[in-house]
Image (cartoon, rainbow, N blue to C red):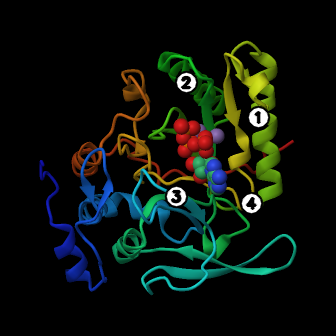
Amino acid sequence: KAQPLEHDGEEVAERLGVRLTSPNRVVFPGQGITKADLVAYYEAVAEVMLPHIADRPLSLVRCPQGRAKYCFFQKHDTGGFPEEIKSTTITEKDGEQQDYFYVDDLAGLIAGTQMNTLEWHIWGSRRQTVETPDRLVFDLDPDEGLGFDTVISAAEEIAARLTDMKLKSYPMVSGGKGIHIIVPLKPEVEWPEVKEFCKTFAQNLAEDEPDRFTANMSKAKRKGRLFLDYLRNERGSTAISPWSARSRETAPVAVPVSWDEVKTLKAANLFSLDAAAARAKSENPWPDYFKIKQSLKGKLG
Ligand code: ATP
Ligand code: MN
Ligand code: MN
């Protein structure tokens, strides 16, 4: 097996003092990727991934017996997790207090991998400002059979409409079938208004271009169309974190790309762990992502 990752995962875990059991257990059987390989991958991307994932409530996709077996989403800290995965208490809509996971360093990513986390899903807000999202995500879901060129032009259309509203957006291939269009925000506006903004945006698009888009989740309405899933922008909803691996057949990664690059892509799942790790070291597809300051203030209703 090729060993392109810079460091050995077992050594990385040891250096950081994070307990790693069964480092040689295969988690992606199709590729022979082990738990230690995944640790090495997160070490390679931590510098670029942590600014996206740190301090956000998480939903983890855990696969205790590897990708091909039973996997489940876990949102709440029910105990038994390593201390490197931290916990933050959030008051739910019904007033109940719930503990959510978060991480803010590489040790946290390794500890999550130790717990067989194959996907890291993030809230749109951070624990310190949990009621005011600092990113929107438009999750573009093509109906079966639509070509990727259709997904690309749809993503460009969404970006153009956002640009018209003076909102800069950034594309990410999901590692699955679609593209996520992400809008960084100053955390100023609260969830209900943010959701309303996204809903109106999606409905306007579907109304203007009913042959291409739907904002309706129902499978029937999706027929031959792209579903613009705006419901990721709701308090408690998640989207896959930039640079997270996906628990899918080919072990792909959700990877930030540039708008120029998007045009050249053939599918959303073509970045392997090695390709993503190499990219993390060599280029920054979103150079101003954390620099630009934009807000939905003055753009609502
Ligand atoms: P694709 O490009 O193939 O659509 P995706 O990651 O966008 O990949 P979706 O099915 O569109 O997959 O889901 C979008 C997001 O919604 C996911 O990244 C995840 O964060 C969240 N999600 C989907 N299903 C669940 C679930 N059962 N429980 C919790 N969150 C979910
Ligand atoms: Mn999607
Ligand atoms: Mn979706």
What residue is drawn where x is 39% and y is 74%? 105
The percent position of residue 156, horizontal first and vertical second, equals 55, 24
Disc 3, disc 4: CB below 8 Å? no
Question: What's under tag 1, amino acid-wise?
Answer: Met
Residue 71 is labelled as 3
Q: Earlier in the sequence, mark 4 or mark 1?
A: 1
Disc 4, disc 2: CB below 8 Å? no
The percent position of residue 165, horizontal first and vertical second, equals 69, 34
Does residue 105 sit above or below 271 in this rendering?
A: below
The percent position of residue 167, horizontal first and vertical second, equals 62, 39
> How busy is the neighbourhood of tag 2: few (under 14 within 10 Å), some, or many (20 plus)?
some
Question: What's under tag 2, amino acid-wise?
Answer: Glu
Question: What's under tag 4, amino acid-wise?
Answer: Arg
Distance CA(mark 1)–CA(mark 3): 24 Å
Q: Quadrant of residue 154?
A: top right
- Compared across the picture, whether 265 is left or right of 230 comes to left
Q: Earlier in the sequence, mark 2 or mark 1?
A: 2
Give the structural element (helix, strand or loop) at label 3: loop
Foreground disc of the pair 1, 3: 3
Residue at image mark 1: 217
Asked if disc 2 is less than 8 Å from ligand 1, the answer is no
Does residue 89 sit above or below 221 in this rendering?
A: below
Distance CA(mark 4)–CA(mark 2): 26 Å
Question: What's under tag 3, amino acid-wise?
Answer: Cys
Residue at image mark 4: 235
Does residue 227 sit above or below 115 in this rendering?
A: above
What residue is drawn where x is 79% and y is 39%? 199
Residue 156 is labelled as 2
> How busy is the neighbourhood of tag 4: few (under 14 within 10 Å), some, or many (20 plus)?
many
